[in-house]
Image: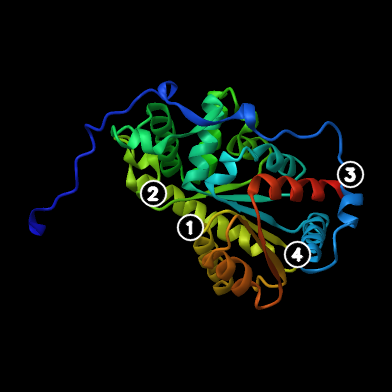
Amino acid sequence: MKKDLKPIDMSSVKTYPLQDRVNKVSVNDFATLPDGQVDLSPFLACLPKILKGQDFLELIDKIVTAHQREKAVIVMMGGHVIKCGLTPHLIALAEREIITGFAFNGASSIHDFEIALIGETSEDVSAYLQTGQFGMWEETGKLMNEAIQHAADTGIGMGEALGKKLTALDAPYNAYSLLAAGIQHDIPITVHVAIGTDIIHQHPSANGAAIGEASFTDFRLLTQLVTQLEDGGVVLNFGSAVILPEVFLKALTIARNLGHTVSRFTAADFDMLQQYRPAENVVKRPTEMGGKGWTFTGHHELMIPLLVQAVLSRF
């Protein structure tokens, strides 16, 4: 049997209109920003200078100082952050150039892209899996794979290509999209995928070579960003348990191999559960040459707005 095994032909895979899909997440439920500046200083002053209270205050100081010294602040994020409606807060930091770069996994790029297109995302996997419809949404696969092919053809990264696609389409909900914001504010967004993990890989329009080429370009771009963490930069991991901690570790290795010290920086992981790879590959091992690393456990929809508004309070 093994000698007769051949790759399946995906050319006949059926896709369905995105407008027909029932979604769990809408921009109507996204986080909103307060009118005017919120001063959290009195609240922060009430926190105990003990354990995570002290760690949180130190992290805020590190982010503020990094911005003031024009050091890199890199945010790595999993798709759940998008689905929790948190892009308005992150866009606020990007607009002020406090965040200097984002790194997405594939799920982040898909949820962000769909939000820009239709203002909704997150299908019912169980329901659509039964009928073979899970992930088979025409516009998501077609438009994203077109952008990825363009990235491979022109030598740009996947994140840049997706952001430019949304900008060219003038997608109706671009104001909620980090990919679009990256183009608007000239903030690099890199996308790091594993072939077969994302719904757009199921589509007839998917080109594995183009996906690999575009994501590999983004890996090299992220490595260049990582070199800028030296002596005061900050890297934050929001909810990526496997892909981005592994990518970050390899990017850091290349940077140091090429002669960049990349020490004395700050790393922090935010997630609902503490996982092995973020703790070891983002927080602990990379900061052993100098710097600090912390883990914070809690729901993204509470922790990320708190962090963002605490940082903005300092300005």
- Closer mark to the observer between disc 3 and disc 4: 4
* Cα gap from disc 1 to disc 2, whole angstroms: 11 Å
Q: What kind of residue is marked 4?
A: Lys
Evaluate if marks 3 and 4 touch, with contact meaning CB atoms under 8 Å apart. Answer: no
Q: Earlier in the sequence, mark 3 or mark 1?
A: 3
Q: What kind of residue is marked 3?
A: Asp
For label 1, the SS is: helix
Q: Which mark is residue 243?
A: 1
For label 3, the SS is: loop
Residue placed under numbered mark 2 in the picture: 197
Image-based side of 47 in relation to 55, left or right? right
Residue placed under numbered mark 3 in the picture: 39
Identify the residue at horizontal 23%, vertical 38% (top origin): 10
Residue placed under numbered mark 4 in the picture: 52
Residue 156 visible somewhere in the drawing? no
Image quarter of residue 274: bottom right
* Cα gap from disc 1 to disc 4, whole angstroms: 26 Å
Image-based side of 219 in relation to 94, left or right? left
Neighbours of disc 1 within 10 Å: few (<14), some (14-19), many (20+):
some
Identify the residue at horizontal 86%, vertical 33% (top origin): 36
* Cα gap from disc 3 to disc 1, whole angstroms: 36 Å
Neighbours of disc 4 within 10 Å: few (<14), some (14-19), many (20+):
some
Above or below residue 106? Residue 240 is below
* Cα gap from disc 3 to disc 2, whole angstroms: 41 Å
Evaluate if marks 1 and 2 touch, with contact meaning CB atoms under 8 Å apart. Answer: yes
Q: Nearer the viewer, residue 220 or 103?
A: 103
Q: Earlier in the sequence, mark 3 or mark 4?
A: 3
- Closer mark to the observer between disc 1 and disc 4: 4
The image position of residue 225, as x and y in percent, is 62, 58
Evaluate if marks 3 and 1 touch, with contact meaning CB atoms under 8 Å apart. Answer: no
Image quarter of residue 282: bottom right
